[in-house]
Amino acid sequence: MYNFQQYRHIQAPGWTLGWTWAKKEVIWSMMGSQTTEQGDCSKYKGNTPHCCKKDPTVVDLLPGTPYNQQIANCCKGGVLNSWVQDPANAASSFQVSVGAAGTTNKTVRVPRNFTLKAPGPGYTCGPAKIVKPTKFITADKRRITQAMMTWNVTCTYSQFLAQKTPTCCVSLSSFYNNTIVNCPTCACGCQNNSTESGSCVSERSSHLASAVPGKSTNAPPLLQCTSHMCPVRIHWHVKLNYKEYWRVKITITNFNYALNYSQWNLVVQHPNFDNLTQLFSFMYKPLTPYAGLNDTAMLWGLKFYNDFLNEAGPLGNVQSELLFRKDASTFTFEKGWAFPRRIYFNGDNCVMPPPDAYPWLPNTGLKPVISLFQPVMTILASCVLLWANM
């Protein structure tokens, strides 16, 4: 399994892969993974297959599995990192010994109805397609062997299938305007939703400690009560303006008391990323899907420093600053140009405030005209009085 997505992980508790056998195949043994159920193997005497189900469900083994049950790229608990952030851990492998399938490529039938949960819904898998047989190179690189048969299955992700509501939102502020533009109200849900009563808790609640469950990847979300009710908020603050540069501060805050994020990432779209000069305490890689257009960046934390976003609380945030060089032909603080066009957190599109709510430059055109001439008139009057005294 290869995770070719540039900025979406498959997080704990990991992937679950399923399919339906075309005939009456069984799984005799597995290396690097296991099925969740054995099924009815009562007709087999002596040696019992690993799984006799028509539609097996396969999960990865956990780290620390004995070496005689491992193969390369296995045993990561089903976690696959994104292709850009950690390509060495963006693949997973397991080996299956299949019975009752025949022994030639004319008797083997391709399985059907592949499903992938990672760990919940969101992925849709196409049919298996027979491709050129995979070739294997021996360790001494002097011999190549070939598989009898190879097929590929491609699974695509949809955020709309994965969850009913968004998972993150964006707030904005700037040094030139006192207005702080919060995330849109009810961006990810509302507090008074009767169908999800008790799904949030106030950070000042005396029952907070008892309400927060133990650290578990399967725990239901327990959010801090906010106006937006999003698990994650990204705040973009236009901090400083220099002669040739300008500076931005990004803060990511986790409002989920039951979930933390390891190896999180951001994808930000802004036209000035083609002149990003310096980045503090974040990693950076430009994403250029179109030649000649460099307006999208992927950001993530430094390993063992801030690549882990804690659950909601005093430590539930990470932050960094970005220094951009001004391009005289495009740079401006007017009309919200300094704010991002779009932000993704862990691959999910975040809710942006409406453009008409962005902090704008103060309107200097409405100042009284007298204020421009009053200092000059005062100086002239002083000069006249001085001349008269002389």
Image (cartoon, rainbow, N blue to C red):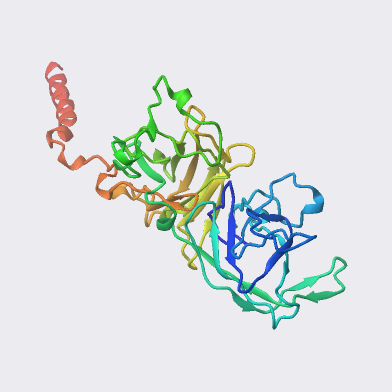
**In this rendering, would 113 be left or right of 34?**
left
On the image, the x and y values in percent for residue 373 come to 15, 34
**In this rendering, would 384 be left or right of 263?**
left
Q: Nearer the viewer, residue 107 or 388?
A: 107
Q: Which of 54 and 120 is in front in this view?
A: 54
Quadrant placement of the C terminus: top left
Quadrant placement of the N terminus: bottom right
Compared with 196, 70 (above or below) is below
On the image, the x and y values in percent for residue 144 come to 82, 75
Which residue sits at x=58%, y=55%? Answer: 16
Considering every residue shown, the one lying at the far top of the view is 389
Q: Nearer the viewer, residue 303 or 191?
A: 191
Answer with the quarter of the image where residue 204 lies.
top left
Compared with 37, 231 (above or below) is above
Answer with the quarter of the image where residue 59 lies.
bottom right
Compared with 45, 242 (above or below) is above
Considering every residue shown, the one lying at the far bottom of the view is 106
On the image, the x and y values in percent for residue 113 come to 54, 68
Which residue sits at x=69%, y=81%? Answer: 107
On the image, the x and y values in percent for residue 15 come to 59, 54
Numbered label tally: 0
**In this rendering, would 280 be left or right of 248?**
right
Q: Nearer the viewer, residue 145 or 16?
A: 16
